């Protein structure tokens, strides 16, 4: 039999784990981790320049300098798997007082996720920036590891339910703790990587950068996983104490 307190703790931890997993999954799949706000464009010369940037962004070769400059100039947003720019829907938009804008996105392919970063973005002769390279790879791999740990914990918990056993509860709690640490490390790596990028390539005048809601979702998922881990650890420890007390009582 499972005490009502343990059952309540297990239910609450399951809900927290589910919320954290949903938040992290949405964060990984969306592009609003970091967003730029650019000033409006006036003049046909600037319009032609931005149009060429947009075309190279969508169809050109993958280059960090190119897509970074486009993000700076076209109200770009960037996530773990996507980079997007806000562009006008009509060709002669610069003649309209309030043109309609649409978002165009390009995904990072798997090989691009492992492309080295350079000390001067776009300059392959400047030497590889090892810190930025591994921060980028960590921010890509860590959330996948976090989700994998939660899936593994869920499978173990399902098997434990079928066996009517609380024995694996502590191990499941440790998996949730590791998942929460991976989620937190993802956010830290992303913020550190963006800070180093902005030091290597200075933002243009009147262009501001801000954190997006996707990053906050990933950040929220970390304490939710940790709270689930704490509840699972408490349930495992309390159940173990009561079990040994009952065993000692029966022996006596």
Image (cartoon, helix red, strand yellow):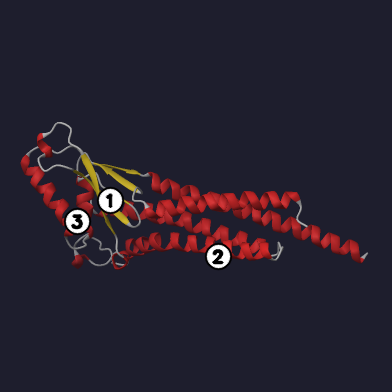
Q: Nearer the viewer, residue 36 or 99?
A: 99
Q: Give 127 or 193, whichever is nearer the viewer.
A: 193
Residue 231 location (% of width, % of height): 65, 52
Q: Can residue 209 be spotted in the picture? A: yes
Total residue callouts:
3
Which mark's residue is nearer the viewer, 1 or 2? 2
Q: CA distance from mark 3 to mark 2?
A: 38 Å
- List x then y, in percent, for residue 47: 10, 43
The residue indicated by pointer 1 is 198
- Is residue 203 visible in the rendered image? The answer is no
In the rendered structure, find residue 98 and report the number of the disc placed on it.
none
Instruction: Give the distance between the C-alpha atoms of the residues marked 1 and 2, in whole angstroms.
Output: 37 Å
Residue located beneath label 3 in the image = 58
Looking at this rendering, what residue extends furthest in the left direction?
Answer: 45
How far apart marks 1 and 3 lie (CA) works out to 22 Å
**Disc 1, SS:** helix
Question: In this rendering, is residue 73 above or below 129?
Answer: above
Residue at screen point 57% across, 49% down: 16
Q: Reading the chain from its start, which is encountered first: label 1 or label 2? A: 2
* Residue where numbered disc 2 is placed: 152
**In-image side of 238 versus 35 (left or right):** right
């Amino acid at each position: 039999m499972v005490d009502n307190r343990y059952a309540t703790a297990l239910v609450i931890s399951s809900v927290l784990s589910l919320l954290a997993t949903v938040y992290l999954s949405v964060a990984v799949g969306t592009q609003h981790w970091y967003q730029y706000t650019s000033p409006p464009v006036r003049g046909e010369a600037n319009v032609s320049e931005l149009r060429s940037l947009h075309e190279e962004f969508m169809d050109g070769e993958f280059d960090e300098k190119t897509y970074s400059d486009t993000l700076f100039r076209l109200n770009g947003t960037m996530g773990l798997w996507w980079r997007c720019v806000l562009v006008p829907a009509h060709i002669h938009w610069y003649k309209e007082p309030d043109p309609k804008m649409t978002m165009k996105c390009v995904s990072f392919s798997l090989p691009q996720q492992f492309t080295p970063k350079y000390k001067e973005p776009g300059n392959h002769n400047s030497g590889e920036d090892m810190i930025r390279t591994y921060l980028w790879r960590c921010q890509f791999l860590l959330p996948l590891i976090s989700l994998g740990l939660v899936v593994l914990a869920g499978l173990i918990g399902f098997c434990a339910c079928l066996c009517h056993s609380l024995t694996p509860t502590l191990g499941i709690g440790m998996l949730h703790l590791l998942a929460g640490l991976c989620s937190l490390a993802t956010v830290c790596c992303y913020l550190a990587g963006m800070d180093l990028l902005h030091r290597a390539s200075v933002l243009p005048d009147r262009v501001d950068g801000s954190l997006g809601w996707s990053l906050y979702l990933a950040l929220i998922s970390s304490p939710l996983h940790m709270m689930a881990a704490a509840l699972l650890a408490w349930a495992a420890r309390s159940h173990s104490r009561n079990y040994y007390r009952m065993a000692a009582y029966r022996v006596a």
